[in-house]
Image: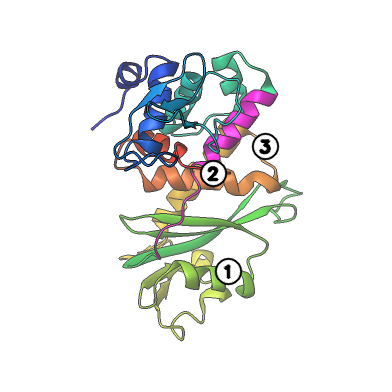
Amino acid sequence: MRYTIKTFNERFPDDDSCLDYMFEQAYGSMPACPKCGVVNPSYYRVKNRKCYECKDCGNQIHPLAGTIFHKSSTSLREWFYIIYLYSVSKNGMSAKEVERHLGVTYKCAWRIAKQVRELMNEGGSPLSGVVETDETYIGGRKRGKDITFQDKEIVFGMVERKGKVKANHVASAGTRVLLPRLRESVAIGTTVYSDQARVYSTLKRLGYLHASVNHSTGEYGRGVVHTNTIEGFWGQLKRSINGTYHCVSPKYLQSYVNEFVYRYNHRQNPIFPVLIASASRRVR
């Protein structure tokens, strides 16, 4: 199943269709009017306003209140269009690109991009089965002949083979930081594959099945024991940050990581219907 631009244009041709969608998502199954108590109430659209009114008592409800579209002067369809572009973009979309698409200021485009990424923040149940785990370093400079980790930001990730990925921007790669993250993200009894970092040395005592590969000797796979899946995710993340966003501050790095985690976790199905449905929920 695909969700193309043709599908999008047919489903959301104008602002009214977008607002009707938001209303149906938020209030379509409302059993009774919260003010007059009429069962299966009928609402009509108030002219020139982004709200609906009960035919029986005049109670008004605002489907955009508390959502990412709240008090935005940008066209609702333009918001939907940018969300669609994010859903089909494999490498992300920068605020400058949003600015060029909509013809708005960079400040407005940056806010829209930030709010769309907020929709991609999801939790989920612990990983199980076979899980690969690794950490990567983003940003900073290459100093002298050798690569150092000074000024680099650390992202810790775990991926379930043929399943979902979890990744977090962390303060350090030490045991006290990474091990609690792993324990809350991976179910006990899971098979965990990693490199030979010391942080993973206690996994067997914690109830995990653990095996590792020794990258320092050039070993990157030993049968089913490898970390190639999580390395592939890091490659996509880094290429996209370097090629699309160029520079990401540590303050907002987690939101960019969430974007690519979300895209990876929904890779089997069209992302836009899921993403736009989550936009109808209250976030404030």
Determine the residue positioned at 50% across, 66% down: 217
Identify the secondary structure beneath mark 2: loop
Query: What amino acid is at disc 3?
Result: Cys
Residue 38: x percent and y percent? 34, 38
Mark positioned earlier in the residue sequence (2 or 3): 3
Determine the residue positioned at 31% across, 67% down: 129
Give residue 247's mark: 3
**Quick check: can you spot residue 271?**
no
Q: Nearer the viewer, residue 52 or 230?
A: 52
Within-10-Å neighbours for mark 1: few <14, some 14–19, many 20+ = many
Q: For residue 262, which quarter of the picture?
A: top left
Task: Verify CB contact (< 8 Å) between mark 1 and mark 2.
Answer: no
Image vertical order of residue 267 relative to residue 197, above or below: above
Within-10-Å neighbours for mark 2: few <14, some 14–19, many 20+ = few
**Quick check: can you spot residue 67?**
yes
Give residue 283's mark: 2
Mark positioned earlier in the residue sequence (3 or 1): 1
